Image (spheres, rainbow, N blue to C red):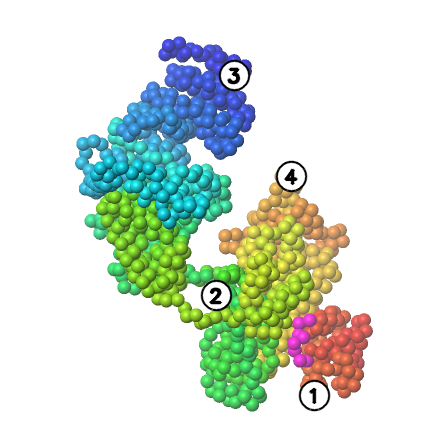
Amino acid sequence: MDCELLASCSALGYLEGDVYHKEIDCLESVKDLIRYLRHEDDTRDVRQQLGAAQIVQNDLLPIVVQHSQDKPLFDASVRLMVNLTQPAMLCFGKVPDDPVFRNHFLTVTAHLQAYKEAFASEREFGVLSETLYNFLQLDWEQRQEEDNLLIERILLLVRNVLHVSADPNEEKVIDDDASIHDRLLWAIHMSGFDDLVKFLASAQSEQQWSMHVLEIISLMFRDQVRSFAAFNVAGQARSMEEKHKDSQELEALKQREQAEKRFRTLQRGTRHSRFRGSYVVQGLKSVGEKDVIYHRNLHNFKNYTHDTGKTVRRVPKRNRTATECQEKRRSALNVRLFLREFCMDFLENCYNHLMYLVKESLIREQAQQHDETYYLWALSFFMAFNRGNGFRADFVSETMSIRTFHFIERNITNYYEMLLTDRKEATSWSRRMHLALKAYQELLLTINEMDQSKDESIRQSSVVIKSNIFYLMEYREIFLTLLRKFDETQQPRSYLKDLVESTHLFLRMLERFSKGRKNLMVQRKKVKRRKSRGKKNPAVEASPETLLEAWKILTESLTESIVPFDATSETPLEEQRTDAMVRIKDALLARLGPEALALLRAAREVWPEDDVFGSADVEPEDELELLKQILHADLPRSSAPEPVAEEEDDGAELEEEELEPVQVSETEFNFLDFIKRFASPNIVRPYLILLKSYSKNPPHTNHCIARMLHRLAVDLKMDALLYQLSVFNVFNKILSDPAAAAYKELVTFTKYVMNRFFSVAAKNNKAFVELLFWKNVSAVREMTEGYSKDGSEKKPAWTEEEEEELRRLYEEHRHSDVPDVVETVLTLLSNTERTRRQVVTQLVRMGLVENTKELKKQKKGTQIILWTEEQEMELEILFEEFKDSDDVLGNILKKLTAKRSRARVVDKLLSLGLVSERRQLHKKRGRAAQQKSTGRGVVEFSFIYCINVLRHESDESEEEEEQRRGKAKQNGTRRSRGMSGPLLWLQSCLNRTADDRQHDDLSFPVPLVPLTEANEDAMENRSFHRLLRKLGLRPPANEQESFWRIPEKLSVSQLRSAAAALSPREEETEGVEEEHEPKSPEENLHKNREEEEEEEEEEETSGKHMAQALTALLLALKTKHSSERPGMCGNDPAAASSCQMSPVNYSFPHHSTLQLHRAHKYCLENLKEIIWSKCGTCFFKSLIDNFPANNFSVVSIK
């Protein structure tokens, strides 16, 4: 032992008889030991040395018992014992794999078991109970912080002592014998500590100790079973169900023993055998070519196997079955009596209140990690006890709700996901999952008990709960999912037993519930899957005469109908608008007049800008004219999906499915259809695993297995699903079992399946071969009804010439730069009827590729999932660049280096906090003025759309130019209009935020809260809002926010530069002072009128200039229509000269240059598909090239 530790332990005091004499430095020595424990190493050497010195048994416990009046010493001693009794799992983190650390772990565990035995005394718990009682007598206001700390330490000490597990080698006790844990529970009871626990669980003022109380209660009952029968005492009457269960088990044991006795009697011969020696077994070959030589008695020959005497092969660790949890035991009589009374009092007075507090703590994430396991245990244990102790629904009303079902279902899902991801802790996650499953099972059992209640209100409550859990898809299919995902290497046999019994109970309840109702509606969630479809019919090529005839037929049958816009689609709005026009034309070609007109009118409501589909008050004759122009227009069609032939082959799928949002709908429930979901080998295998241990299973478990197999084989007539060799092997064991009479249900079902199999084998000579394989539904149907005929649906074979051609083409292009080798080979094959799947499968068979995954078709888009730091930074830069544009998301997608889908980019923008909701990324509608439609064609509508974009951009350019001309003038104007106070307030807020972020090195959104009327008026001013946006401030993101905020992404330098931009310069300040000289109201009114008149004159002038530009452009359009070869004047001089007209004089201000340049650029880039684009380009080009710097005149229009 370390000398310093030895000195500290010696300075505590000494025990003389039953009296402990403490030293003067006792308190300081206890504090030194606490300090040593704080600095121990990974081997926990200090803890081991103190445990070897038995400091808890010889020093700390006597100090606590005999010197409890010394409050500082008592507090320090309890604090030290809490540290020493800390579980070994928390000290080491996990069970160490290293042998050296494993030895240290076992040593610490042995010391903890010695501590637990020392605490099993009424005297020690009496002192703790008395101290805790005195503190609880104080009101909340009278308690000090030290008192609350001591209460928590006492509860933690009791929890740590109860948490110590028993030593199986030392405690080889039987049922009804008192173990160390039983003695500890008796000490708790005799000291009255259990009453204090119940008080803490029920008192309104002690809610903060709810989790500690629940941990202590769960550890008190850790070795007890859930049923009420475990707490029954000798002499008390048992229920008829328990008596019947015990008699069944006793009868099965009796029959087994008698059958084994008869079997041994038959094995012995009637007289002494004279042929004791070796025998040669003819027809059974040994290792060599000779027959087997048998050296045993003949009556044991039928059990002979070649594996006799061989060493058993070691099973790999990853393939071993999961180990079972600790076995439950029955405590001593007096302990059972005490626990029974505790459970009854707890249910009546504490259960609902405590479970509510714990549930709220878990939902609000105020508890520690994995504390929900205590909640799940308490729910399953006390609800099971309530069912066995005269069921009272009001005792457990808190946990009988849909919220509880949802909470448990969510935890089961979470545990399963962690079981797959966290492989190192798979055992712990499996136990937690088992605990959640038992809680779910207990909820179903309680609902079943409520159905049998005599109280009508309780039965109605049960119906309400059942209607909810049967309606929702998550609760209906949870057992189906758990059975399909069962893994015996990670989940123990007890978990499978509870899962099978819970499934049986759920199906029985669902069957009864559905039988009493004719039309039971349930929720169904369907995921739309986008797959490559087959060949589409090509577009109908119609002659002008056919189109004219179709239009005559459709003119009289046009009415309203549907809407063409898909808000959930990721397709851009422009493409959806083009698709809408194509759909209108297809409807007209198919002579669906009502649908075509409905699409036109619906598209007009969705895209009202630019009157592309006509104006809102368009006349019916104009609508008919517009439909006629759409019918005759040559519209671009989106590329059709690649034709893929649907074939069944051994290869994997060549293209993965892309999931879309889940669609929720209602459908009528059919119980038989629901049972068909269980007709799968993945469901039958878990039942077979549990059926193998039929002799050890309880009778109820065997009944659940037989009932499920009966549903599949008899109700669904799919007995061929059980035609498998491993299933028949288990059936053979059941039939040959000497105690088969105890399993009448299993024997009857086994005989039924075997009879059905032999009747099928008489018709199908391949039935015995089918025993080697598990079968799905289609294989079952083929086995019983007959296989498909030879030659039907046979794929065309590959000839030698085709194989040679395929090999040559693949070798030529396998190392080329083509994006898809298979597509290239398909286009070059002489046989054009071959599909992609056939080519890939043949390449695999020829050995040119190893598997189909190497030639998997690349999905459109990208496979990138993770975002690097550089990509996140690029996304932030692009967002800052385009956040004020009309199509933020579209511009970002065009500029991104690593191409990603719209959904990925939106999710990343949300996670980075750049936007708060998805609707901020929706495309904004243009502000262009709408014009009336007079029946013009699609070409003219597109032309007007171009002009409106030009006008919109010119307005923005004028605003930007005015802003660039004088920021000082704007600042002075704002201040002159009463904004000086709000601007100074905004400047101080920016500076103060910059100082805080520079000092604290933390960034978080800061709200701008106006406290004066001037500031409030400014925050409601649109001009002030524009200023805030220019500075980078963020408006309220949703309904829960009321104030503008300074974003956390703005750095200190940006904040200071924004604040400096708000400061007026000297010249501006002088101008502002001059402007703020007192003037008469008449002068102010006169000045305002002059300003308004000047603004109206400017708007009039700009409107005239814009009208002149529109006139010139329309004149160019008419010139194009009058030319012989429209649209070809860009390169041919002769054509250009034939398109010239008389000179026209126009005078434009300087800023119209930018308008014409932008219109020219827009025509070139965005209107290439329109017929007149080349003439329009020539017009703009000559118009821009010929005007002088400030204005121009005499422009020749080409």
Q: Is residue 221 visible?
A: no
Which one is earlier in the sequence, the residue at label 4 or at label 3?
3
Which one is earlier in the sequence, the residue at label 1 or at label 3?
3
Q: Pick whichever, 461 or 1044, lies toward us.
A: 461
Q: Residue at x 40, y 9 (%)?
A: 16
Query: Which residue is outermost to the right?
Result: 1188
Label 2, on which residue? 648
Residue 378, compared with residue 658, is above or below; it is: above
- Which of discs 4 and 3 lies nearer the camera? The answer is 3
Q: How far apart are marks 2 and 4 (CA)?
A: 68 Å
Residue 219 location in percent, x, y?
A: 37, 32
Q: Distance between the residues labelled 1 and 2?
A: 61 Å
Dots 1 and 2: beta carbons under 8 Å? Answer: no
Badge 4 element: helix
Label 3, on which residue? 1
Label 1, on which residue? 1122
Q: Distance between the residues labelled 1 and 4?
A: 74 Å
